[in-house]
Amino acid sequence: MLYSLHLAGTINGVILASLVPTVPFVILVMTPYIEQIDPKLEAAARVFGASTFRVFRHVLVPLLAPGILAAGLLVLVRTIGMFELTFLTAGSDIQTLVVALYYTVFAAGVRSAQSIDAMAVIYMMTTLIWLLIALRFVNPTQLVARVRQ
């Protein structure tokens, strides 16, 4: 499909190929957060004259911010780890850190072990920093707790 749309070997093709398998994870993470929002809050905003965009921006987004952060983290970690999709769709011009790490490890010739280790540390530190940021703002129990009214 990417070849027929002339997206293979482009950054847009890599983004699209990475987006498709992550959508179910976003839905699973966001569902408890969406279910916790009281519809009366939206109705109250509309009573005071808020448009649909203003309700979304000023009421829903602040309430959904922890879920958006958690879903974003999950998508980021999953996308960084999806080597095969990036490798097959990126082509020779685009390299993510994981693809560059693969090429460095398995390419012909002599490679510095320090460069491989450095790339692996960068990969792990990126994921760790995002995890620490997410844990600062998101309570892990929010991902599974559902409030029923």
Image: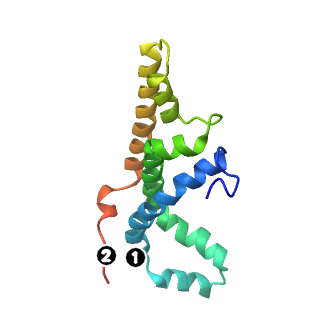
Q: Secondary structure at mark 2?
A: loop
Residue at the right extreme, as displayed: 6
* Count of picture labels: 2
Residue under numbered circle 1: 35
> Residue 14, position in %: x, y?
59, 48
Instruction: Work out whether residue 83 or residue 42 is closer to the camera in this orientation and state it.
Output: 83
Above or below, 5 relative to 103: below
Instruction: Work out whether residue 73 or residue 50 is closer to the camera in this orientation and state it.
Output: 73
Instruction: Work out whether residue 109 or residue 19 is closer to the camera in this orientation and state it.
Output: 109
* Residue type beneath disc 1: Glu
Q: Residues within 10 Å of mark 2 (few under 14, many from 20)?
A: few
Above or below, 99 relative to 4: above
The numbered dot on residue 147 is: 2
* Residue type beneath disc 2: Val
Q: Residue at x 58, y 81 (%)?
A: 45
> Residue 67, position in %: x, y?
44, 61
Above or below, 35 relative to 100: below
Figure quadrant of residue 138: bottom left
Q: Quadrant of the C terminus?
A: bottom left
Q: Residue at x 48, y 54 (%)?
A: 72
Q: Residue at x 48, y 67 (%)?
A: 63
Q: Quadrant of the N terminus?
A: bottom right
Q: Residue at x 30, y 80 (%)?
A: 148
Instruction: Work out whether residue 73 or residue 141 is closer to the camera in this orientation and state it.
Output: 73
**Relative horizontal placement of residue 149, taking residue 58 as reference (left or right):** left
Q: Secondary structure at mark 1?
A: helix
Give the Cα separation between the discs numbered 2 and 1.
8 Å
> Residue 103, position in %: x, y?
50, 27
Which one is earlier in the sequence, the residue at label 2 or at label 1? Answer: 1
Q: Are marks 2 and 1 in contact (CB under 8 Å)?
A: yes
